[in-house]
Image (cartoon, rainbow, N blue to C red):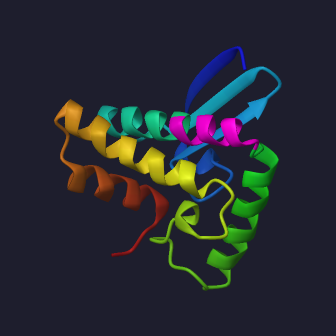
Amino acid sequence: MRQIKIEFIPHADHIHTTIGYWEVEGDLLTIQVSEEMCFANKAAVIFHELIEAFWCISKGVTTAECDEFDDMFEKEYEAGLWPYSVEAGFDKRCPYRKGHVWGSRFEWVVLKILGANKKECDAECNKLMGVVE
């Protein structure tokens, strides 16, 4: 990997139920983050995606493997097997699970460093993803 590109995109343009996404194509790591979020959330999600992607790259887990799992999990959402409050990355079948767990920890650190209110940030993310609490 030689380049990292960060894009802020309309939330509706994500291919999965998420506020952040990464993919590796050749030497380029692209991170996409929902543009509707506050600055602190954008920063936290960028770090989450970086950690998750770097973990996957170091373990040989490909973007295609992650997307295949996420596609399957989307079908499980649609079938009513999971509420949208359950993140695919925490599922024990998930190939990027450990990267997701570490990325989530880094999110908390970034929000803390920036002095953001985690509950407000979580509520903002949940609203974008249609999570009903």
Please check the rendered image and state whether residue 106 is part of the magenta-colored stretch, yes or no: no
Q: Residue furthest front?
A: 59
Q: Residue at x 53, y 52 (%)?
A: 100
Point out residue 54 in the picture as x, y percentages from the top left corner. 61, 34
Observer able to see residue 21? yes
**Side of 6 where 37 appears, left or right:** left
Q: Nearer the viewer, residue 63 or 80?
A: 63
The quarter of the rendered structure image containing the C terminus is bottom left
Please check the rendered image and state whether residue 57 is part of the magenta-colored stretch, yes or no: yes
The quarter of the rendered structure image containing the N terminus is top right
Q: Residue at x 78, y 20 (%)?
A: 27
The quarter holding residue 92 reads bottom right
Point out residue 75 in the picture as x, y percentages from the top left corner. 72, 74
Q: Residue at x 46, y 66 (%)?
A: 130
Task: Please say if 50 is above or below 119.
Answer: above
Q: Residue furthest top?
A: 2
